[in-house]
Image: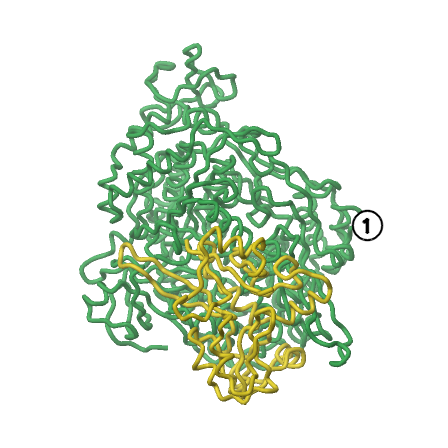
Chain colours: A green, B yellow
Amino acid sequence: METYDKVKLGIKEDKWVNSICSVCHYSCGVRVHIVDGVAVGIEGLPGMSWGSKGGLCGKSAGQLQVLYDPNRVNYPVRRGNPEKGIGVDPKWQRISWDEAMNEIVDRLGKILREKPSRFGVTSGVRVGPGEHYFIASVIFAAVYGASFVSTGAGLYCGMATHDVAALNHASWRMAPDFFHGNYTIYFGDQIGVGGHYLNVTARARADGVARGMKIVVFDPLCHNVAMAGKEWIPILPGTDLIVALAMANILVNELGIYDREHLKRYTDAPYLVQENGLFLRDDSGEPLLWDLADNTAKNWKQPIGNAALEGTYEVRGVKVRPAFAVMKEHLRQYTAERASEVSTVPASTIRRIATEFGQEARIGSTIEIQGVKMPYRPVSAIQFRSGSAHTNAFHQQMAVDLLNQLVGASDVPGGCIGYGPAVGYGSPEKGLPTHGPVVSKDGYMSVQLLPGRTEWPHHDPEVPTNFVLNQLFTSMALPCHPFTLMKGGPELYRKLGIDPQLDALLVVAANLMKNFGSQESVAEYLKTIPFVVCYDIFQNETTEGFADIVLPSAAGLESLEFTTPTRRIGMAPYCLLDNAFPVRQPVVAPMYERRDYSDFLTDLIHRLGLTRQWNSQLNLHFCKFCGHPDIFGLDEKLSWSAVADRFLQALFGPEKGLDWFKEHGYLAWPKKIDEAYWRPFHEGRAHIYMDYLVGVGDKVKAICEPRDIKIDWEQYTPLISWFPPIIQKEKDAEHDLYLVTFTDSLHAGSWTHGIPWMAEVSDTTGYHYTILMNPKTAAARGIKDGDTITIENKYGHSTSGVVHIIEGIHPECIGTIYGTGKWARGQPLARGKGANTAVMTEVDLEHICPITVTPEAAIVVKVSKGGTSK
Amino acid sequence: MRWGMVIDLAKCISCYACVISCKQEHFLPAGVFWSRGVVGEVGTYPAAKKQFLPVLCNHCQEAACVKVCPTTATQQREDGIVWVDANKCIGCRYCVMACPYQNRTYLAEIKPHHPGQDFTEMEKMGRRLYPLTEGTVVKCNFCMERIDAGMAKGLQPGEDREATPACVNTCPANARTFGDLDNPDSLVSRLIREKKGFPLHHEFGTEPSVYYLRY
């Protein structure tokens, strides 16, 4: 709404332009108000199911300020100071694009001819300039033969969640069905409240709450997710696992509440397990079940009358029991009392929540939606990064999902929903193809979420040839943090026979110094790379410390992006919200000498003589993945906008090319009921018993042990089990507190702390640039609100900050938001604010989940009064 | 007709989108907020609970600020909106002291959001489109420019986005509702009646037009 007199003000241009947000993973539909070429307003697109249907979070509004931030990188610059390191002044010297490109082409061309794998590409996942930066980087690395590192994976990513979501929900993560659910348990998650899935679920969650939905939150900190009528249950970090196991024990062994039909048909619960822990298989290698209908063993492919969940049987001379029976007995050790001792959650609370969850699951009930009758299970248990970022991450996430599987609350109305969505039937006008889970090895469901990767079965562990260790750790959802694993030097890689040395590194919209832990090790490693090029919108700790050349990136609202909806990794309409295909267009042309990364990359590719490989990969990533014939000729030199136009026309018809999308912003079509609640309509089983882990563990061990590499082999076990996180073992009389980190809806990573609106609001909250501490903890140490304290971990790394005393934090924990403690000059508003936890987060083989390589994000610390308050 | 707002605290997620959309809508300079969040806690561990209260001008029927203004710069419209005519405001700040809710700001200086650096292109355009006057008192005006322009086009505030306050439109959790308090059938009236909506500090006797729903 224009509220001013255009004629009086002499305004010539006044328009709104549709686009999509780029500040977090989600990509909400937005429209931007342009007055005489200046973007002055932004709001959510009311009709768009990507986002809050007209609502918008604060950090998305902050994009406007990013466009005009005087601290942006506006021109290519070269390092003037040969010294590199933390806090070193780079002494930037402005250079021309031609000069920068010539040097990059010369140096990368030489590496390409000699040893391409000594060139590395690392990209932020969407945050900032947009998803296409990440996707284009993946493709570029493949084209070049370079090493690729995702920086989204790792400390701030739900690595275990992604693996378990794929295995059990054919999706990238899980969410409660806020539309039909009545009861949900957050084991460390903030969906609908914060993080990068805020907008799409916020209104659904709020409506669920207004409808009377009960929300229970297990968390060391009472933050926004547990406010206002939700139940907060303080818990020690990394112990959600044993609480979830105790709840499973109560459901199965005390209350006898479990969904027998769901377990039999949609999980591996009836698979017969030998005394050695492995499935009993027939001659063709298929797992066997026991059919009570005719008392015979059958393989999972055969028609089963009534699969046994309990009992002991003898098949082929071998004593076997259904996996469910084995698990049921195994769970008995996890009493509420034992879980209470470990987690500090009262046993009576564990018992009450388990009972409420089981009763509200309404096993056997059905619901009719759009004329379709389906199972109705209005409960869910969910976890994301904050709950699972511990050395027991895989078992944590499996235990939480076990609660959903036990009561059948899996991808049915009211339950835990694979968020992606898992199933899509394409658009009405050809468009995106059908996708969804298929039945694969051992009867489990399998899904392809990303080009080139099938989520089940995992490939066999191999001796890695690349320092991105996903050849060895096969449950890793994304290649991640090899820099961090160089803590103490690249010894690990030498043992594996991998040359970790890079001759050049391209860092795209990522801040390696803040995204990873082991900050000093990362710094030492980056110093060894002779040629580092960063492509970013701001100077940050990585560019200032280690870049030789920094190139000026377009911001999200200055760029063209069509790749997001082609992925199936969680960024899509939720439950029955409309399907959509949005396109981001520049709402203003890139200012100064800023360029869209895709345009830079296209230019670079052609100059390096990689045009044929590039077009081949475009066909693979966009056409083949979307079920469409190849459309890119191998020798064509297409601009990014030409690629977009041709791809959109191929998907949606000649009339719906880039121009159509620029005018309309997005294409939407209704979702079908069996796209949203797909479980009753698709075969393929979920895991409650990980027979495969035995073999995987043996193979990883066979590779590692001869090379003197030790990880926690015990976690490669088929039964979901309690493994104490390493922080429980590290805690002692001196280092007696856990430092936990968190985020909220105002921030995505570290860079948003430098956006003015974000910064000035964060200054007012008391939760952003402080160290949160319980009054009892403070009193025992003589600490008062506002005191400066120093926090030190067991490895001699420390940071300091100002204490804010609150009741809503576990007395054995202190808390701080992550991404703070920045020292770069590039974003003055963020500089020197808050504690720097990245320097204290140790990431090595002892501090990762040995299955999913999730780093331990909580830190054992001691605190002392005093320090340098920033 | 009296415009009013209802904020559902059970839905609110403390995201500050309302605060930032307000800054955007009115091109408010650094350090100036017409919409704020008040953070606190109730209870003691382990029964403690974080609390967040989004606040803005209450557009009181018996507005203390209107009563004390010596120049009639602060005035109340027939539709209940309390606003400040910058042309009449002399910056005496009586209203700032009189407001029991502390929702008024004296605009001593229009500062850029990047300290020590020039105003950005967006900030400069903001001053053209939405002038603010240094040395006057500023506060939330229920986005009366949107209401007036929208109603002139036949739109209904609270129902049509273009005629509705920015904070209401942007709320990711749909926690805010806007409408006519004098109309017993309006959504705001029904929410207040059916869900026992309450104003802040009823005992102040100012009869606010902003109501809250308890969780």
Residue A745, above or below A624? below
Residue at (34%, 47%) from the top-left corner?
A711
Instruction: State the count of labels.
Output: 1
Where residue A495 appears, as percent x and y from the top left, is: 39, 52
Asked whether, in this view, residue A173 is left or right of residue A726, the answer is: right
Asked whether, in this view, residue A46 is left or right of residue B209, the answer is: right
Q: Which residue is mark 1?
A: A655
Residue at (51%, 48%) from the top-left corner?
A207
Quadrant where the N terminus of chain A sits is bottom right
Where residue A106 appears, as percent x and y from the top left, is: 64, 69
Quadrant where the C terminus of chain A sits is bottom left
Residue A160, above or below A778? above
Secondary structure state at the residue bearing disc 1: loop
Estimate how packed mark 1 is, as few (under 14), some (14 to 19) or many (20 or more) residues with alpha carbons within 10 Å: few
Residue A443 showing in the rendered view: yes
What is the chain letter for disc 1? A
Residue at (36%, 54%) from the top-left corner?
A856
Residue at (74%, 50%) from the top-left corner?
A648
Quick one: A104 or A713, which is closer to the camera?
A713
Q: Give the residue at the far top of this rendering.
A: A294
Quick one: A550 or A554, which is closer to the camera?
A554
Where residue A702 appears, as percent x and y from the top left, is: 38, 40
Where residue A869 appears, as percent x and y from the top left, is: 33, 77
Question: Type of residue at label 1?
Answer: Glu
Residue A80 showing in the rendered view: no
Quick one: A334 or A198, which is closer to the camera?
A198
